[in-house]
Image (tube, rainbow, N blue to C red):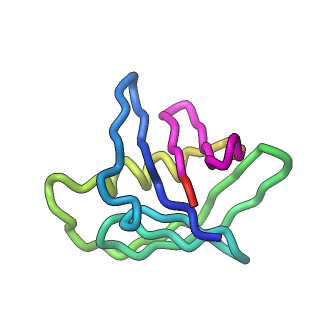
Amino acid sequence: MLWRATSIQTAGSTVIVPSPDRYTLRFNDGLGIRAACNTCGGSYTLSGTRLAISGVFSTLIYCGDDSLDRDYLRLLNAAVTAEVVDGELVLTSLAGVLRFRQ
């Protein structure tokens, strides 16, 4: 199942993702991640709502000054919980919140 990011919330500010198809997440045997112009992956464990993401790797393409790829990947790496609420996947951490829709 492919999840598309809809918002990135950090330090009290929320950014609506202008191109959700450029910031995606897929949970399979590992993680399939798209962060703007970068292809990424990693591994995860999920137990109830507790999420642990590790071994994230990424191509290192510069996606432009307006890209959200750095904040997106930082919050993915920091995520500690995952919940589906009203059809929306919500990943939370001390650093912020990522919201996704299918």
Which quadrant of the view contains residue 7?
top left
Q: Is residue 95 magenta?
A: yes
Q: Residue at x 55, y 31 (%)?
A: 94
Q: Is residue 99 magenta?
A: yes
Q: Residue at x 35, y 42 (%)?
A: 16
Please, which residue is most extreme toward the front here? 86
Q: Residue 39: image x %, image y %? A: 41, 76
Please, is residue 28 above or below residue 8 in the view? Answer: below
Tell which of 87 and 84 is nearer to you.
87
Please, is residue 5 above or below residue 85 in the view? Answer: below
* Quadrant holding the C terminus: bottom right
Q: Residue 24: image x %, image y %? A: 48, 65
- Judged left or right of residue 92, residue 62 is left
* Count of number-bearing discs: 0
Which quadrant of the view contains residue 54?
bottom right
* Main SS, magenta residues: strand
Q: Which residues are magenta?
A: 84-100
Q: Residue 20: image x %, image y %? A: 39, 59
Q: Residue at x 32, y 66 (%)?
A: 36
Please, which residue is most extreme toward the top here? 12
Please, which residue is most extreme toward the left here? 65
* Quadrant holding the N terminus: bottom right
Q: Residue 61: image x %, image y %? A: 25, 73
Please, is residue 92 above or below residue 17 in the view? Answer: above
Q: Residue at x 14, y 54 (%)?
A: 65
